[in-house]
Amino acid sequence: MPHTFDPGYFAEPFRTLCMNYPESDVYVPDQFRVEWGPIFHRGRLDGSARVLVIGQDPAQHETIVRRVLVGEAGKRLQGLLGKLGITASYVIINTFLYSVYGSVKAATAKDARLIGYRNSWLDALLIGQKVEAVIALGMAADAAWQAWKQTPSGKTFNVAYAPVTHPTEPESSSKNDKKKLAEATKKLLENWNSGLQALSPSVKNPDVATALVAYGDTWAAGDRPAIPEGDMPAGLPSWMHEQDGWAARLGIDATTKRRNITVTVPRGIVT
Amino acid sequence: MPHTFDPGYFAEPFRTLCMNYPESDVYVPDQFRVEWGPIFHRGRLDGSARVLVIGQDPAQHETIVRRVLVGEAGKRLQGLLGKLGITASYVIINTFLYSVYGSVKAATAKDARLIGYRNSWLDALLIGQKVEAVIALGMAADAAWQAWKQTPSGKTFNVAYAPVTHPTEPESSSKNDKKKLAEATKKLLENWNSGLQALSPSVKNPDVATALVAYGDTWAAGDRPAIPEGDMPAGLPSWMHEQDGWAARLGIDATTKRRNITVTVPRGIVT
């Protein structure tokens, strides 16, 4: 069976964007893991994207794969896109090019160089392209969208837009409390249902004609599909897009952890 | 400063080659770490290569970077190419797509599907292209070359060819014995000097006009330059091409080790 893959950043303007990105003078190392390099996108760069997604920042799985939103948050997003009939025609960038370390100071997030670079990506992905809907995952992504909307090109650009709760907000906010997790998940899915209602009429060219089916109170079977192989660079093993939890930052203290990513092939593959 | 990068496998025939590669029915899991996926090449795929190199198999650094010969062996090769005036116009493939586990059985290495796929790469990189010299690193690579030379296209193809000792053979053969290592290194460098003598007259279009300077009895300053940033995928941090020893297979037993790659940012980068 042929293995599809993402051909990456060979065409302009993406080739130039991936050669000239903000570094540690903009993404300061006390707030970002700049030492692992920037991670740019996932999905279609060939103009076929119908939905644009803005995520937050890359974590350890993204750092190994060099594509954004490939872990659990990515699977949940994949399910959300699927409910709009979008199985391939999407493109995803993050608010931040580098993994957030601790929290981001307002002054850093508002740095004109940081915003300007991200806006160049948004210009490239939106102006004169086919995007019919934009989704922002979480508050930082919503702020990123608003910053673009204040630019001359953003001001005059009309597209359906829904800021929704970040896919793993329930885990972040509930801190291992199962009851809180269930409540937060229910709240997230209600929020996502509203987002789907808002965007669904605007997605006129889905990959698969799909009647909108709302989420229930918790994740159902099929709500967290695997990341498509075609979103990965060439040659990556299937467990990297089918599974999650195979990369971790391990270490006895904060600095050791920060310097480490441990990749473990999931059980059942090496026999 | 712009960061150059390798745009990868977007053009044919490489795009199709990277979609259709031999898997565990050919590269059997008791001889190859197929679970980490195939790793295809390093260097120029745009027809500008003047020297073609055949290496052996990818190890842990190659698995993270997804390009071949990026560790210590790669640096030594980079030095060898530099002595021919070749700083950018090279392309490297390996004998084996996957990391060797233990040793490779003769029957596996002679599998027509394994050889046929590799020959498709050699056809693509040689027939009608500009390559002026071919280097094989180690005996398996020499056998790979001979197998291609037996094909109809190989038989009629004339190019300068030198099989040389594998760059890290001294470490493999000396098993931490310093005296043996020094002797094996001297022997390797003598062997490489012979290879340079054989190939140098044929490399008529080097990147940099260079008078041939032979190796001494041991590695000299400048003999192990860093892997060029332009050989790496987009966005990889500089330590991944400038340094070595940042990836290891760790674990308490063979299976655990096989399932693990631990990446550690070198000292002095996270402060």
Image (cartoon, coloured by chain):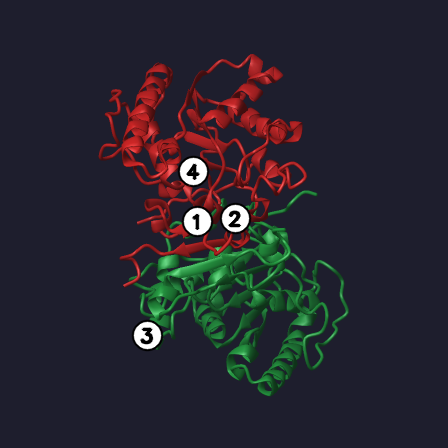
Chain colours: A red, B green
Q: Chain of mark 2?
A: B
**Mark 2 residue element:** loop
In the figure, is residue B171 to the left or right of B199?
Answer: left
Seen in the picture, residue A239 relative to B164 is either above or below; the reply is: above
Residue marked by disc 2: B8
Of labels 2 and 4, the one closer to you: 4
Residue marked by disc 4: A69
Residue marked by disc 1: A234
Q: Name the kind of residue labelled 3 in the image.
A: Ala
In the figure, is residue A246 to the left or right of B165?
Answer: left
At 35% from the left and 59% from the top, the residue drawn is: B35
Q: CA distance from mark 4 to mark 1?
A: 17 Å
Q: Position of residue A200 (x, y in %)?
A: 34, 18
The dot on residue B107 is 3
Q: CA distance from mark 2 to mark 4?
A: 21 Å
User: Is disc 2 in contact with disc 4, using a CB cutoff of under 8 Å?
Assistant: no
Seen in the picture, residue B208 relative to B171 is either above or below; the reply is: above
Asked if marks 2 and 3 fall on the same chain, the answer is yes
Q: CA distance from mark 3 to mark 4?
A: 42 Å
Q: Position of residue A241 (x, y in %)?
A: 36, 45
**Mark 4 residue element:** loop
Q: Chain of mark 1?
A: A
**Upstream in sequence: badge 4 or badge 1:** 4
**Upstream in sequence: badge 2 or badge 3:** 2
